[in-house]
Image (cartoon, rainbow, N blue to C red):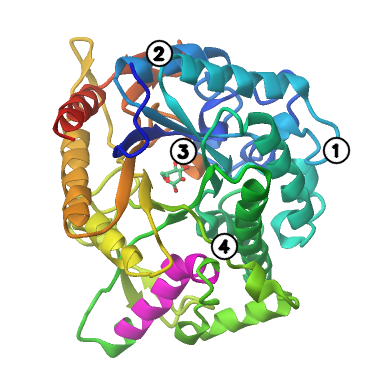
Amino acid sequence: MNRDPENSFKWGVSTAAYQIEGAHDIDGKGPSIWDTFANKKRKIHRNQNGNIACDHYNRYQEDIDLIRDLNIPNYRFSISWSRIFPEGVGPINMKGIHYYHRLIDYCLKNGIEPWITLYHWDLPDALEKKGGWTNRDILIWFEEFVSFCIKTFGDKVKHWMVLNEPLVFTGAGYFLGVHAPGKKGLSNFLAASHHAALCQAHGGRIIKSIKSDLKVGTTFSYSPIEPFNPENSKDLKATKKANALVNRLFIEPLLGLGYPVNDFKILTRIEKFVKANDEKDLKFEMDFIGLQNYTRELVKYSPFVPILNLKVVKASKRKVEKTLMNWEVHPPSIYQSLMELGKYSGVSEIIITENGAAFSDSFSNGKIKDEKRVIYLKEYIEQVLKAKNDGVNVGGYFVWTLLDNFEWAEGYHPTFGLVNVDFESQKRTIKDSGYWYSEFIRNHARKE
Ligand code: BGC
């Protein structure tokens, strides 16, 4: 397979270290917050964890062979910080570095372009012991990690993403306590959010200062928010608040627009963590924005939910088609996300760095006929191409995800993969959706 020409539309597939690598304590890796959190009782569905996951650390060649055989030209994965710096900062672990060199080299040898996410939620546990994202020193720790990765791998890897979905790791990890490290409360959340917002810009600056020719982006979760009852003024106000929190909290400071405090007053409390010069330091011009969309959210006013005073009306309560995550299947949501994000003048290029669906799959005659996933991908991709036609500068699309894997608090239950994994034997089986995506890319490339 020949490498993708630089100006072509980037078709790809995404994964994240903790969800697939396993080898959690092998070859000198230090524990991350996910190792610690997932090994506590009653945090994860059926008390599962990522100790072994897809054993990708040992089987990466087989997995890259699958990507090559499926004709997918771009592969997005993340680096486990504590595999390189077991204590977060300080001494480095050569075996971890060699692993990522082997992985990158094997991608390149097979004509696959590696795209690296620097932080996909697995903070070294040693740093969490010092307060993790709530401690402003994270800026110094993160700088050490980012600089090292760019100096070490920057000659081989052209595309870098600083953070994966900051709202999700600060919201679920430091506000709701349902993800690692399991902290709760507004103060933890706002401190973590401000430091993450600074790190996303800071990370971009560090990368460019070391190698100005690298392509730098960062990724955001994005779900169009609609009022449950458009006639109800309280629902309308709740929608604005939810939109400020869910979609605008991290992108607007990055674009120099500040935090969206006008639409959600409680966010003004973030000022407690803001220091002189921060406003300017929150800003950075990314080469691309990674947009990750799965669904839309319907929001309702609710006086019973503390702090937020609003709630999301789940898909299961709405008689709509839904995935195993209880997320509504709604292809126009990706079009709308692209249109909304594309309107910001500071956003130059958008790449869909994640989109996909969890459905239960079953074997029939040795094959997995996951028709629902095929339809989902087909219809969402149609909407992406429609937005492109309508003038949004969208330059690529990555499916979430290559392999069925450890889906955070949901454990191994929701399966998103293009490839099924039998976790007993670690046998991989390509699903119909994998073959479909492969054929789709081949046909699309012919037309380009
Ligand atoms: C995350 C992935 C996750 C996926 C499905 C995104 O929020 O980046 O790690 O598995 O969505 O929930």
**Mark positioned earlier in the residue sequence (3 or 2):** 2
**Mark positioned earlier in the residue sequence (4 or 1):** 1
Q: What residue type is labelled 2?
A: Asp
Is 243 situated above or below 153? below
Residue of label 4: 284
**Where ligand 1 lies, by image quadrant?**
top left
Tell me: 375 left or right of 24: left
Give the percent coordinates (x, y) of residue 405: 45, 30
- Is residue 48 at least partly visible in the picture? no
Q: Distance of mark 3 from mark 2, alpha carbons?
A: 23 Å
Q: Distance of mark 4 from mark 1, alpha carbons?
A: 27 Å
- Is residue 256 at least partly visible in the picture? yes
**Mark positioned earlier in the residue sequence (2 or 1):** 2
The residue tagged with tag 1: helix, strand or loop?
A: loop
Tell me: 193 left or right of 69: right
Residue of label 1: 90
Task: For label 4, count other residues whose C-alpha is less than 10 Å away and answer few (under 14), some (14-19) or many (20+).
Answer: some
- Which quarter of the rendering shows the N terminus? top left
Is 347 situated above or below 419? below
Asked whether the residues under the numbered discs 2 and 1 touch, taking CB atoms below 8 Å apart as contact, a structural biologist would say no
**Mark 3 residue's CB less than 8 Å from ligand 1:** yes
The residue tagged with tag 2: helix, strand or loop?
A: helix
Q: Distance of mark 3 from mark 1, alpha carbons?
A: 30 Å
